[in-house]
Amino acid sequence: MQMWNFSKLEFSERLFDSIRYWELRRVVYNLVLLTLAVVCWGPEMLSGRPIDFFAGVLVLVVFAVPANLLYCAAYPVDLALQLTPWRGLWTRCRWLLFLCGTVLASAIAIWVMVGDHMA
């Protein structure tokens, strides 16, 4: 049995399925990280001068870019597993990759925010 025997049409279908799946969940991922940032930094940003607020927003944007680039790491994993005979099992279990990635990103965000307050 050849594992990687697929047509261009099948590849494009799998690619669009992957994009559809992950882009819908990117909103949830970003909302989780934004909620953590607002809970941890919100009171501090609102209690200071307006310049502190804008500096805080800039920091959020700076951290949002790498967080979303790391989110894209799910695409090659998802696409590769969709092109195997285990596609059926993978499509039922890929929410676990989303959950683990979101928890890891949340842990890193909390570590960065707590580390910022400890310094």
Image: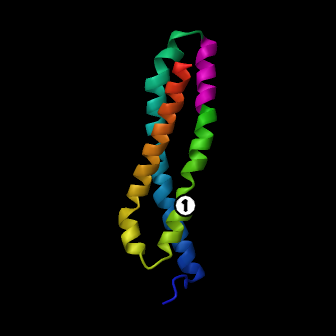
Q: Which residue shows up at 48% across the image and 72% down it?
A: 82
Q: Which residue shows up at 50% across the image and 15% down it?
A: 44
Q: Residue furthest bottom?
A: 1
Image x and y of residue 42, in percent: 48, 21
Q: Which residues are magenta?
A: 50-60
Q: Judge left or right: residue 109 versus residue 100.
A: right
Q: Could you say which is closer to the camera, residue 73 or residue 56? A: 73
Q: Is residue 22 part of the magenta span, yes or no? A: no
State whether residue 2 is above or below residue 34.
below
For the C terminus, the quadrant is: top right
Which color scheme does this rendered protein use? rainbow
Q: Judge left or right: residue 32 versus residue 12.
A: left
Q: Which residue shows up at 42% across the image and 44% down it?
A: 103
What secondary structure predominates along the stretch shown in magenta? helix
Image x and y of residue 1, in percent: 48, 90
Q: Which residue shows up at 52% across the image and 64% down it?
A: 77
> Visible in this render: residue 28?
no
Q: Residue furthest front?
A: 119
**Label 1 neighbour load within 10 Å: few <14, some 14-19, many 20+:** some
State whether residue 42 is above or below residue 101.
above
State whether residue 72 is above or below residue 115.
below
Q: Could you say which is closer to the camera, residue 69 or residue 111? A: 111
Secondary structure beneath dot 1 equals: helix
Image x and y of residue 19, in percent: 53, 61
Q: Could you say which is closer to the camera, residue 114 or residue 30? A: 114
Q: How many marks?
A: 1
Image quarter of residue 39: top left
Q: Amino acid at mark 1?
A: Tyr
* Residue that carries the numbered disc 1 in the rendered image: 75
